[in-house]
Image: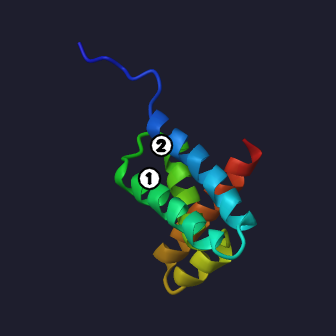
Amino acid sequence: MALIDPFPDAELISLGQDLNEAWEAERLAVDEAVEGAVLRCCDIVKRIERQPATTLAGLTIKVLALSWCHDGDPLAWASLCASTTDRRLVASILTDIIAARGTA
């Protein structure tokens, strides 16, 4: 009998918390500290990228990582996805997930 993981995507959720903290440090960083803060976020985002998501909570963390890649601006990814209906739907899904994360 297969065991069910009681905490699916726990690693992704933990990485999301790490990214939130590192991103805040990046926003507050000045001068020489900026590069280190960006590299810390980049490292976390790469780890998020490699970790498979199995729940909506895990997918939300991946969207958070994508948001960091675009400086937190959903319009940035919307403009990248604006040329066709399927790309606009992707942008809409990403925007909805970020919005839902803010209300959770």
The residue located at (49%, 76%) in the rendering is 87
Name the one closer to the observer, 71 or 30.
Answer: 30
41 w.r.t. 75: above or below = above
Instruction: Identify residue type, mark 1.
Output: Ile
Instruction: Name the outermost residue toward the top.
Output: 1
| Residue drawn at (37%, 48%) of the image | 51
Helix, strand or loop for disc 1: helix
C-alpha gap between disc 2 and disc 1? 6 Å
**CA neighbours of label 2 inside 10 A, class few (<14), some (14 to 19), many (20+):** many
Q: Residue 48 — which label?
A: 1
Q: Residue at x 56, y 66 (%)?
A: 36
In primary-sequence order, the first of circles 2 and 1 is: 2
Q: Amino acid at mark 2?
A: Leu
Q: Quadrant of the N terminus?
A: top left
Residue 15: x %, y % from top left: 51, 45
Residue ID for mark 2:
12
Report whether 101 appears left or right of 87. right
The mark found on residue 91 in the picture is none
**Would you say the residues marked 2 and 1 are in contact, meaning their CB atoms lie under 8 Å apart?**
yes
Q: Position of residue 64 (x, y in %)?
A: 58, 57
Q: Quadrant of residue 27?
A: bottom right
